[in-house]
Image (tube, rainbow, N blue to C red):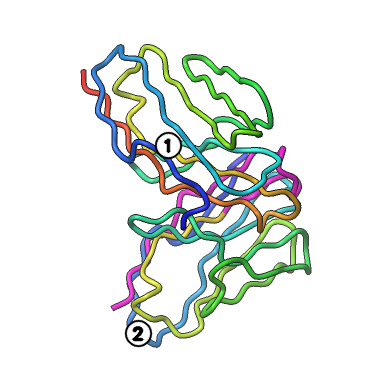
Amino acid sequence: KNEVEQSPQNLTAQEGEFITINCSYSVGISALHWLQQHPGGGIVSLFMLSSGKKKHGRLIATINIQEKHSSLHITASHPRDSAVYICAPWRGGSQGNLIFGKGTKLSVKP
Amino acid sequence: NAGVTQTPKFQVLKTGQSMTLQCAQDMNHEYMSWYRQDPGMGLRLIHYSVGAGITDQGEVPNGYNVSRSTTEDFPLRLLSAAPSQTSVYFCASSATSGSADTQYFGPGTRLTVL
């Protein structure tokens, strides 16, 4: 059983649409990272959060530690948002406790 | 700052060959790690290091060795390459091993073992 589940696995949207990507996990964690992997393969960190909500530009991330769920929202989506978005919960302790979802592949059409 | 660099970008090996994937960071980060990414799977931790001279195994360490003689460098050695090691390899670093730190990833090395 996967400890981290992301949904949907694939998502196609029209430019301008509001996007939601969900992440559920089955283990206790102290924080959660959202990562973006570009079509060329590079991975960048978007957010780290341990409670509530964070916003950066058109991206918003929320987390409910008790319900073991996090969401990543993109407002006014744009073709340049097309990427794979990866949820990575942190179980605490050393880096060995960072676990990764399989990712959600987002394609935004103009 | 170059951030996290990896070389080579692409590599083709024959079964049984050995090689070293290079990783370097210029941010004076304490923590460095190696992951592999396979189709349909999340990133999986191979080895990690919490500082120079200290390394430990991750989820999938078999067939790989690491060492950390300096803060900057964290090479990954494939001892005797196998087709199952065909993957994309990412090196990452963070200021400390704590969960609050931003993770910085290298551009990846795409390895094919024939």
Residue B12 place in picture, x, y as percent: 33, 71
- Between residue B32 and residue A95, name the one nearer to us: A95
Q: Image quarter for residue B74? A: bottom right
Tag shown at residue B1: none
Judging by the rendered image, the residue that carries numbered circle 2 is B15
Amino acid type, callout 2: Thr
- Between residue A72 and residue B101, name the one nearer to us: A72
Q: Which element type, helix, strand or loop, lies under badge 1?
A: strand
Q: Which element type, helix, strand or loop, lies under badge 2?
A: loop
- Mark 2 is surrounded, within 10 Å at the Cα level, by few (under 14), some (14 to 19) or many (20 or more) other residues, namely some
Q: Residue farthest to the front?
A: A67
Badge 2: chain ID: B
The question of residue A95 being in magenta is answered with no
Please name the residue shown 62% across and 43% down the image.
Answer: B103
Residue A61 place in picture, x, y as percent: 54, 24
Please name the residue shown 32% across and 82% down the image.
Answer: B14
Judging by the rendered image, the residue that carries numbered circle 1 is A85
Please name the residue shown 45% across and 36% down the image.
Answer: A36
What range of the chain is rendered magenta? B92-114
Please name the residue shown 51% across and 83% down the image.
Answer: B79
**Eyeballing the image, is A93 above or below A69?**
below
Amino acid type, callout 1: Tyr
The question of residue B111 being in magenta is answered with yes
